[in-house]
Amino acid sequence: MKAASIEFRNVTKRYGDVTAVSDISFDIAAGTLVTLLGPSGCGKTTTLRLIAGLELPTTGTIHIGDADVTQTPAAERDVSMVFQSYALFPHMSVLENVRYGLIVSGMAKAKADERARTAMATVGLSGFDERLPSELSGGQQQRVAVARALVLEPSVLLFDEPLSNLDARLRRQMREEIRDLQKRLSLTVVYVTHDQAEAMAVSDRIIVMNKAVIAQEGAPRELYEQPRDPFVAGFMGDANRVRGMMTRRDATHGDVTLGAVTLSLPHRGLPDGAVEVSIRPEAIELRNSGDAPLKGNVRKVAYLGGLMEYSLDTDIGALFVISTAVERPFTAGSAVGIALANHGVVVIPPGPTG
């Protein structure tokens, strides 16, 4: 199979008076895994369906490889899709499910069986030929759905919330398998999820969507460490948002005062004055109350095995803290000192006003 690039140019999709996708443009390089990430109703699934040809754009153009597929129906696109529900035929065996698309396209049964078994081996299902979907675990059913898509040797492989039906441990295992498969076969993969941890674990790039538009796109680290606006900061993991005062010091940095603490942070082009600051929960260190200039009180405590979660009332507002120091946890009602790390604290530009 040969991976293909994807190009959207000023694509809009309307359903009557409702705009599901509004004037979006992006490029996906061949052989990369890009995730469409965002909350329900943001337009990510509509965008995936536009790539698949299950929806056609109201305006704009879509290219897959060198071909303009803007008005090309799904059956004529070299694209396969793995659905959230897996959509397996319950009365068919694993082999019959995997080879189904080949048989429908007119391929001889013997050749279709050979191709299907090769695809099954790729996802670790050798020897499962005669099993029914009801005899498989959730992870095995997901592998069948992937094999059924791979057997068609598409230039683009699409995943629509593929792990949402699995438990936490299996989700982690399957996302690693999908990423390994994508790298091993050099596939072009577009992956839809609302789970930021899942997106960060599998993606070369992430396109964050909000209210039918692209809020920000880039590498996972870039989006986490340099969010463009408050929405992206909050959606790419937990973020405490507090207000500070900034004085620009030079071409790149400013002094940002948060209560009794002043930090040197990239000013990101913002002027002197009040600024919003994002503080990641893991960037906060709790100390004894006399050991740090910022002060707070512990309101809630949760023990999560390898982590402690704290909710604090502090001089700069309410803070949520994640700590790996589980041996001697603070208790609810404790007075604490608060230190901020050199990472995970960033000035956030204001979001769009529309």
Image: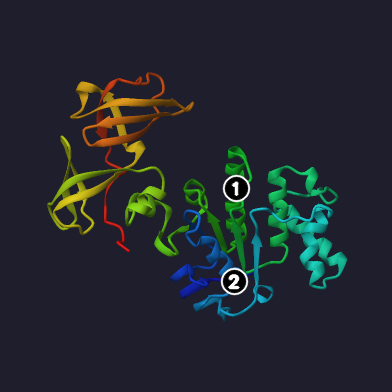
- Give the number of marks: 2
Picture colour scheme: rainbow
Residue at the location (52% across, 72% down)? 16
Question: Residue 287 lies in what quarter of the image?
Answer: top left
**Up-down: is 209 above or below 2?**
above
Q: Which residue is mark 1?
A: 164
Which element is circle 2 on?
loop
**Which one is nearer the viewer's eye here, 157 or 186?**
157
Which element is circle 1 on?
loop
Q: Pinpoint residue 249: horizontal percent, then vertical percent.
A: 12, 52
10 Å neighbourhood of mark 1: few (<14), some, or many (≥20)? some
**Up-down: is 97 above or below 310?**
below
Q: Pinpoint residue 288: horizontal percent, then vertical percent.
A: 25, 21
**Which one is nearer the viewer's eye here, 217 or 54?**
54
Residue type at the position of mark 1: Ser
141 displayed left or right of 293:
right
Question: Residue 227 lies in what quarter of the image?
Answer: bottom left
Q: Which residue is mark 2?
A: 55
Mark sitting earlier along the chain (2/1): 2
83 displayed left or right of 119:
left
Quadrant where the C terminus is found in the figure: bottom left
111 displayed left or right of 121:
right
User: Is residue 3 in sight in this rendering?
Assistant: no
**Up-down: is 241 above or below 61?**
above
346 displayed left or right of 97:
left
Residue type at the position of mark 2: Glu
Quadrant where the N terminus is found in the figure: bottom right
